[in-house]
Amino acid sequence: MTTAPTTTRRPALERGRPVEPAELRRRADWIRLETIRLIGQAGLGHYSSTFSCAEILATLYYHTLRIDPAEPAWEARDRFLLGKGHVAVGLWPIFADLGYFPPSWLERYGSPGSPITDHPDMRRVPGVDFSSGSLGHNLSVGTGMALGLRLSGSDARVVVLTGDGELQEGQPWEAAMAASHYRLGNLVAIVDANGFSGGGATSVTMNIEPLGQRFEAFGWEVIEIDGHDVEALVATFDSFPPPGSARPVCVLARTRKGEGLEAMVAAPQAWHLGVMSEPEREEALAEIEARMGPR
């Protein structure tokens, strides 16, 4: 009688996994490289918005979140909601690397019928806790998830990454009010505050500053940091209060749209949506790879 071979299942990834800051910086630049490759493959995408949150995504998925890529629906996992869904192109390389789906999926990014596209789809992609939908919805959905987890006695945390452009809408502020009312200390909003939305500078289209004071007025604990400083991100994420605490947390991450490429930082809105020419792509790759250096 023969027995089936046994397979070793990768254990769940717990919170606070050890990782060197240099590795997180490399991961952020790797996300930028993959973003350039995937957008070039698809012929359309959002560079500068993705680049502004690359360090945030790297720190969350390689250090902070409690997740199990082998069991994406694991009840004890931390939930992550991508409010600024147009930056999903920066999330897909991470998902393939961690094992949520095969790396071969990346080669179909943006193709007709591909499950991974410009926005996350919870019905088609393992590990996506909620689709992005119309921007501005995810803080409301995250508030509902956090309340449900609280009522079920779970110690899971809900993290929502939102852009500052979304906060020009009314619905996120209704969610902010509800989250503090229900004392949801298991809810974290990370604001990628790069100062721009699709319509231009947020200070011009609809000023939302002072953001920190506004969240504080709604009863949130606010921590303001440089969103590209991985040491600050790690320290901040490690200092989150226990999920059973009573105040939701807002991490106000000040970032630069297009961070990682000098030309994008200088003209962030020009790179909000589009595709690089071949010379532009080669120049961008060279700049990032030179910074990364040899492993």
Image: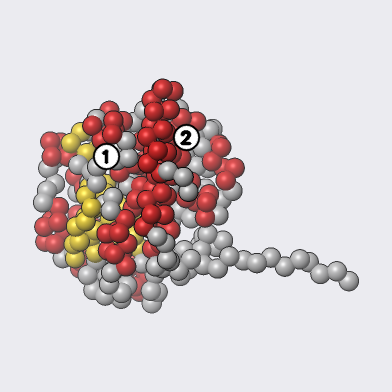
Q: Nearer the viewer, residue 295 or 247?
A: 295
In the visual, does 115 lie left or right of 35? Answer: right
Badge 1 crowding class, 10 Å Cα cut-off, few under 14, some 14 to 19, many 20 or more, is many
The answer to the question of whether label 1 and label 2 lie on touching residues, with beta carbons closer than 8 A, is: no
> Which residue is situated farthest in the front direction here?
294
Whether residue 255 can be seen here: yes
- Image point 12% across, 42% down: which residue? 207
Q: Decide which of tag 1 and tag 2 comes sooner along the chain.
A: 2
**Viewer-nearest residue: 189 or 149:** 189
Name the quadrant containing residue 272.
Answer: top left
| Residue found at the very far right of the displayed protein | 1
**Can you tell which quarter of the image residue 231 is in?**
bottom left
Residue at point 27%, 63% (across, down): 236
Q: Position of residue 104 (x, y in %)?
A: 59, 42
Residue that badge 1 annotates: 257
Position of residue 202 measured from the top left corner of the image (x, y, whole percent): 17, 39
Number of dots carrying numbers:
2
Amino acid type, callout 1: Lys
**Mark 2, residue position:** 37
Taking depth in this image into account, of 72 and 121 the one nearest to the observer is 72
Q: Residues within 10 Å of mark 2 (few under 14, many from 20)?
A: some
Q: State the quadrant of the N terminus.
A: bottom right
The correct choice, above or below, for 125 with respect to 288 in the image is below
Question: In whole angstroms, how far apart are the C-alphas of marks 1 and 2?
Answer: 19 Å
Residue at 31% over, 74% down: 242
Label 2 residue SS = helix
- In which image quadrant can residue 176 be found? bottom left
Q: Amino acid at mark 2?
A: Arg
State left or right for residue 30 relative to residue 209: right
Asked which secondary structure carries label 1, the reply is: loop
Q: Position of residue 285 (x, y in %)?
A: 42, 33
